Amino acid sequence: MSLQLLAQLGFYLLLVGPVVAAILAFKATPPVSTVARHYLLLSWLAYGAATAWCLWACFFARESGGIGNGVFLIIAIPLGVIAGILFSVWRAARPPAYV
């Protein structure tokens, strides 16, 4: 598998996929909406894991040469923001429990 194919796959799964899933979670039929909500949940978990790894690499990993491990904090901030947005959309797309 080439690097370009992996980059395209990651782009569609982690950037385009959650946007489409968010739209489908609100507008689609109930079975499709359920699948879209599950996709949002899995995307949130993936972004959360990436954020946790970046924070671990920034604060707890052995110091490496070059620009240092602090650069991982710069990467963790947008990942955490995206994870928060995905969690909010997932929570908003859930059907009400009292209906």
Image (cartoon, rainbow, N blue to C red):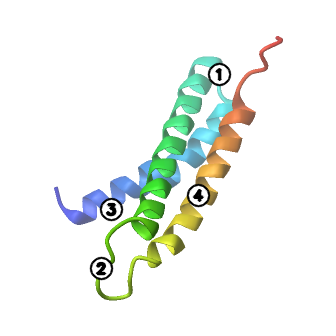
* Mark 2 vs 4: CB contact within 8 A: no
Place residue 92 in its image quadrant. top right
| Tag 3 residue | 7
Question: Regarding mark 4 in the picture, which secondary structure is present there?
Answer: helix
Q: Where residue 7 appears, x then y in whole percent?
A: 33, 62
Q: Secondary structure at mark 1?
A: loop
Determine contact: label 1, label 2, CB under 8 Å. no
> Counting residues from the N terminus, which is met first, the one under dot 1 or under dot 2?
1
How many angstroms separate mark 1 from mark 4 (CA)?
A: 30 Å
Q: Are marks 1 and 4 in contact (CB under 8 Å)?
A: no
Return the residue at label 4. 80
The residue carrying mark 2 is 64
64 with respect to 18 (left or right): left
Along the viewing direction, whichever of 36 and 58 lies nearer the viewer: 58
At a point 59% along the width and 51% down the height, the residue shown is: 83
Residue linked to disc 1: 29
